[in-house]
Amino acid sequence: MERMLSRAVWFAPLLIVLIASGCKDDPASPSIPQTEKGAWARYTPFDWTHDGRPHESTYFTIYSDAASDEMKWQLGDIADERFVRILRLFDFENVSDFVYPPGYSKMEIYINRHHAEGINWAYWGGFIFTIRSPDISGRRYDSAVYIVRHESTHVFEFLIEGRESLGTDVWFREGIATHVGCLESTALRTIRSLSELESWISQNQNIPGEGNPIRIHQHADFPDGADRHEYYRLFELAVRYILDDKGMGNSYQDVLRLFYDLRDGLSFSVSFENHFGIGVSDLEEEVFGRLRAYLSSNAVPARATD
Ligand SMILES: [Zn+2]
């Protein structure tokens, strides 16, 4: 009896709460979209809202304008798995040393479904990923793995450097991100033969910069009308050469040390020379000769794995 009474006393306020929340759930009035925005609104030009239903994976909060819950879960799984592998690649375990933007302790991904800008864009603390297809399957999966690894490598660099703009030269930052993306995906075809390199050099010999990838220090250095996709393949080749034992034989740890130098205020060119044993301007001068020699001795190298 006493037990029944206490249950009734406990149940009464609960009933009131249920009735009150039932009023809010009136199906006739659509739910009001959440207008709170993520770091993308601060660190990119895209002032986008989301649907108010973010998904929490281990390392990421996944927002979207209109992705299904299933797509958010799937991308969260892909991103978690790939991010762990990137940490392993750099032999990095100390995630508490990441410097997040103010107010953040986790990375974020924004799945862009319907905004006109078809962009993939990394920023301090996360990245935007445009997915137009209804699901991530087949070749789309391979492509998603590439983009997640490419953009997550940028985010990794952001979290080590701990600031709004990366301090690396464009050729290096895009080279390492493209290289890490290509280690586990065939979505972007890498340059594997000397004839491909020779063809690039002859096509660009009369264009400002002569197609030299190391000359692209800043975005403004791309020649007018440059095919950036092709430049990214050259950046990848340059970074692969820097890291490969059959090239300059440097390590991912050297890259990590460079990122930390930038956190500490050193310039890219000073840190690069300290860790990679050659000045950026010397590499710029010698790059085609070095890449020719590298590809000549590595006709069809086995696909690298991490
Ligand atoms: Zn990139």
Image: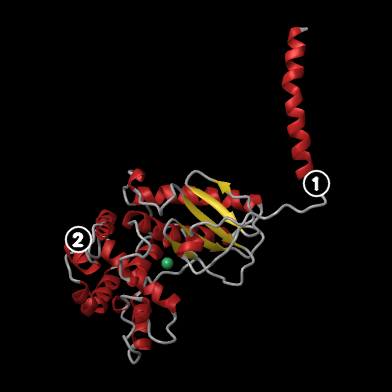
Percent across and percent down for residue 133 are 64, 63
Residue extending farthest to the bottom is: 206
Q: Is residue 191 above or below residue 25?
A: below
Q: In this view, does 34 lie above or below 130?
A: above
Residue found 47% across the figure and 47% down from its top: 81
| 264 relative to 232 in the view: left or right | left
| Mark 2 element type | helix
Percent across and percent down for residue 108 are 50, 53
Numbered tag placed on residue 26 in the rendering = 1
Percent across and percent down for residue 151 are 45, 61
| Mark 1 element type | loop
Residue extending farthest to the right is: 28
| 125 relative to 68 in the view: left or right | left
Question: Quick one: 282 or 104, which is closer to the camera?
Answer: 104
Could you tell me if the residues under marks 1 and 2 are in contact, i.e. CB atoms within 8 Å? no
Quadrant of res 122: bottom left
Question: Quick one: 6 or 99, which is closer to the camera?
Answer: 6
Identify the residue position indicated by label 2 in the image.
275
Res 197 seen here: yes
Amino acid type of the residue tagged 1 in the rendering: Asp
Res 300 seen here: no
Tag 2 or tag 1, which sits nearer the N-term? Answer: 1
| 271 relative to 169 in the view: left or right | left
Label 2 C-beta lies within 8 Å of the nearest ligand 1 atom: no
Total numbered badges shown on the rendered structure: 2
Kindly report the distance in space between the C-alpha atoms of the residues bearing marks 1 and 2. 63 Å
Dot 2: few (<14), some (14–19), or many (≥20) neighbours within 10 Å? some
Question: Quick one: 138 or 93, which is closer to the camera?
Answer: 93
Residue extending farthest to the top is: 1
Quarter placement of the N terminus: top right
Dot 1: few (<14), some (14–19), or many (≥20) neighbours within 10 Å? few
Q: In this view, does 43 lie above or below 76?
A: below
